[in-house]
Amino acid sequence: MVMKKLDVRLLRMVKHSKGQFISVTVIVAVALLIYIMFNMTTINIGNAVEHYYGTTNISDLEVELIRIPQTALSDLKSIQGISDVQGRVSVDVPLQVADKDEKVRIRIMSVPEGGGKINKLYAPKGELPELGDDNVILLEQFAKARGTKTEDIITPYINGRKHNLKVSGIASSSEFIYLMENEQALLTDPKKFGVAYVSETFAQSVFGYRGYYNEVLITLQDQDNIDDIADQVEKKLDKYGVKRITKLEDQPSNNILMQKIDGIKQMSALLPVLFLVVAAIIISIMLSRIVNNDRMAIGVLKALGYSNNRILSHYTKYALAIGLVGSVTGIAGGLFLSNPLSQVFVSFFNMPLAGLQIQYSYIISGIFLTSIFCIVSGLFGARGILKIMPADSMRPEAPKAGKRILIERVTFFWRRLPFSWKMVIRNIMRNKRRFAFLVLGLALAYAINTVPLYMSNAMVTMFKVQYEEYQKMDYTVEFSKPLNERAIKDISHIIEARLIEPKLEYPFELTNGWRKKAVGIIGAPQQTAFYKFVDRDNNVVSLPDNGIFITEALAKTLNVKKGETIVIRSFLPGKDDVVLVVANIVKQYLGSNAYMNIDVMEELLLEKDMVTGVNLATDDNLKEKLKDVKNISAVRSSGDIQESFEEYLDTMIAAISAYMLFGGILGFALVYNATIIGISERTNEFAALRIMGFDKKDIYGMIGKENAIMAGVAILVGIPLGSGMITGMAESFSSEMITLPVILTPTIFAQAAAASVIFTIIAQLATLRKIYNLNFIEALKSRIS
Amino acid sequence: MMQKSILMKVENISKNYKMGEISVDALQEASFNVYDGEFIVILGPSGSGKSTLLNILGGMDLPSEGRVLVKDEEINKYNDRKLTAYRRDKVGFVFQFYNLMANLTAKENVELATEMCKEALDIDKVMEEVGLEDRKDHFPSQMSGGEQQRVAIARAVAKNPLLLLCDEPTGALDYKTGLLILSLLHKINRQFKKTVIIITHNMAIGDMADRVIKMRSGRIVEIKENENPIPPERIEW
């Protein structure tokens, strides 16, 4: 078929305005690239997770208890809906490593003979070895992080005794996709925490669990009645001292994994929309300019008998072309990148890849939505066509009504303004709506830039405040079981501590009506020097004589206010529920706990003089001195946390740079197009100025001034916009485990402003050639379409 | 002289434009007939209302009052869609500044017009008639004014319209080129039996017309029949 001549004209139009066409197309392409790449990646990760959970048969419920006889497990099967039950012994112990200052913990977990049916280990390379009395299978992330290989020996301290165990295999586990020690640990640190799988008989004998387990894994036929079944399990196992029951959705690894996937999903929804909005703004401004320039041509087309609709569709096709070219390249790029990205994610999470998938519905919806976006903005931009009368269009357009503008009334200011600035300001006011749109677009780009700056800022603040203000201890020593307060004295004999405080941390279930949440309640001395409690109004508060402090996140989950009561249910057998007043709601950025006066907690909830650990301020080398002390399960230092946070920051910087780049592309495309449009629209005006004796630099300077005003206003508008985006981001990012503080510092906004100024300048420089090449004299002579 | 059939009846048309608070009477009570195959020149100084009249005849504008009948169809009552169809099928325009599409070649500019018409003429033949068979792949910017105007004429003629309306077709051209364009229009009128209406302020062009309609201040002041129109080659100004 021969191409319609209007379409030929369209193609040549595109060719003629290549720079503009490409710069808008790039925005559309980036939008689609993000959309496809991240959506495909989340689908691939989701599939991989599902597949991995399926093949390893992950447990739906995990019960921690004091001890349960092996024989009692079969009772559970009588509960309707339970499909399989498996017991294990799981204890965290210190691991001896070459560097004496390094504190590494390892979780020793028993595996039934033959590998068991639930939470099966996954070995990508070959078979898993038989487990005996002197060997382990090591979790892959940990082995990798520490450079441990098969045949190496690891040496955990178990009950104060060293055991030399040979690593005879390396495997991954679906319950440690994201290797988290517990909910309190916020970052994965596979160098400092690992898992070693041992035979059941070995674990039971070294930990003193002969014939017993301390954990029960349960799989269900379906997820529908999971809460119900959990309750029944709890009742049935109550006598064995249930500490907590964790559903798969609350399991730390799964929880974080899902959060990451959600985070990617949110990004894949929000960013493309922002990009398309900016593209739509540019397209409509571009088209209204083209239509205006083509007034006469449109008049001729009308005179030739082309209908309004055909002419409108001719120009709208320009927008559609942007949409199609942009979405096709974006989608191709997205598909191309989604596979490696999925692979990176999947291998980062130590999962087998379940095959890569392309969901065509996303491609179709991507093209479809983008096309609609472009068509609508195209129609909006080109709607001026309807108003063009063929007869009028042959005559030169009457000059736009010049009006005095508001600012001129401020005569004091106006009179002192140099002439070129007056022209610039008048010119901006001549097309207020367009100016508003451009400002909006730039403000969006600006706001996009504030988000990553905020994120990095918030993360740093979060850690700083949490570990330098809220929790000031240098070390926390956790006992492997609750001890009498005398243990503190023992420790203070060994260690030279400036300060030592008892710590009691025990899991309870907090309930308010049907809302419930299992958390660790931490007991600390009323005049604690290590913990600082700050309420919502930033007042420092101290632990109450009675009652309990809960964190903001917990208050939200339980839907309680200060002064209301909650019920504390103990997992320990024979303990009654206790009703406590929420004395205050306190800030905690990382983790979610409840706090009590340790004496009150002992009395009301546990036993007198009981402690589960100590907090210390000391310069002593704890690791060395506590090496041979019994009953210590973990020694944590704030330095360790700081270290792993710094590593985490590195990966964040990459993400931030990517984000800034996106904002930069947007801002560049906007300024570039606005400038090109401004130049071509006012060629005649500039020509006149040139004849009057202005040189190229003066004219370029005028455009620069316009852009400067635009960027300035955009930044002003962008500040509230960015604040809103940040608040939204903080809310969507915050979870039960992490509360992202909304910190709006001037630095964030200043840095984002600097980025905006930079891309405005780059875009303006990119148009330099255009204005220097403009033939002003020629422009004055002709007025032919 | 044999009985001439009426192509167009203009009855008492007026046009006034409202510009803010002032109203301008661009055209007042104009009446005349246009016959099939006629060559009419509408003469008048600028502001005399001749362009307004031409725009109304061409369906580019509607009269405020009065009727315009084309083959008994009242085009002043047409809606936008019908007016578009009228322009498409019945009228060919030639403008003072040619108004070609800058990014289409000569031939493509002609095709742009014929693509929509049912009874379009063979484009290559028309290009030959206007003497541009060698220039048809050139872009407007590569052609002289006279050549561009010939493309514009080809564009108007190729549609095979009932009526060719030319708005100052020589206005932007030098004398010699202007004459060539007039000869071309004359040839089209005689050979293709197309009705041609030219508006101009150039009195000399009136000599080649079958009829001259003189206008001043929005009114027709004289309609003069030319017993012996002279060929365009002999016109001088």
Image (tube, coloured by chain):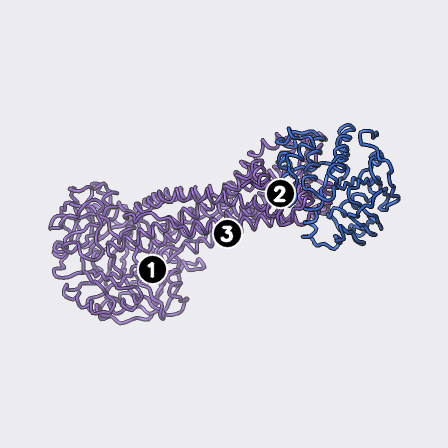
Chain colours: A purple, B blue
Answer few, some or many: residues within 10 Å of disc 3's Cα (few below 14, many 20 plus, some between 14 and 19). Answer: some
Residues at marks 2 and 3 touching, judged by CB atoms closer than 8 Å: no
For the residue marked with disc 1, what is the amino acid? Asn
Residue A743: image location, x then y, percent: 46, 51
For the residue marked with disc 2, what is the amino acid? Glu
Q: Quadrant of residue B126?
A: top right
Residue bearing the label numbered 2: B115
Q: Quadrant of residue A578?
A: bottom left
Q: Chain of mark 1?
A: A
For numbered disc 1, what is the local secondary structure? loop
> How far apart, in angstroms, are the residues tagged by discs 1 and 2?
76 Å
Looking at the picture, tell me which residue is in the foreground, B56 or A36.
B56
Looking at the picture, tell me which residue is in the foreground, A752 or A22.
A22
Residue A367 marker: none
> How far apart, in angstroms, are the residues tagged by discs 2 and 3?
55 Å
Q: Chain of mark 3?
A: A
For the N terminus of chain B, give its image quadrant.
top right
For the residue marked with disc 3, what is the amino acid? Ser
Answer few, some or many: residues within 10 Å of disc 1's Cα (few below 14, many 20 plus, some between 14 and 19). Answer: many
Residue bearing the label numbered 1: A593
For numbered disc 3, what is the local secondary structure? helix
Q: Does residue A600 show up? A: no
Residue A192: image location, x then y, percent: 26, 46
Answer few, some or many: residues within 10 Å of disc 2's Cα (few below 14, many 20 plus, some between 14 and 19). Answer: some
For the C terminus of chain B, give its image quadrant.
top right
Q: Does residue B5 show up? A: yes
Residue bearing the label numbered 3: A723
B206 lies above or below A218: above
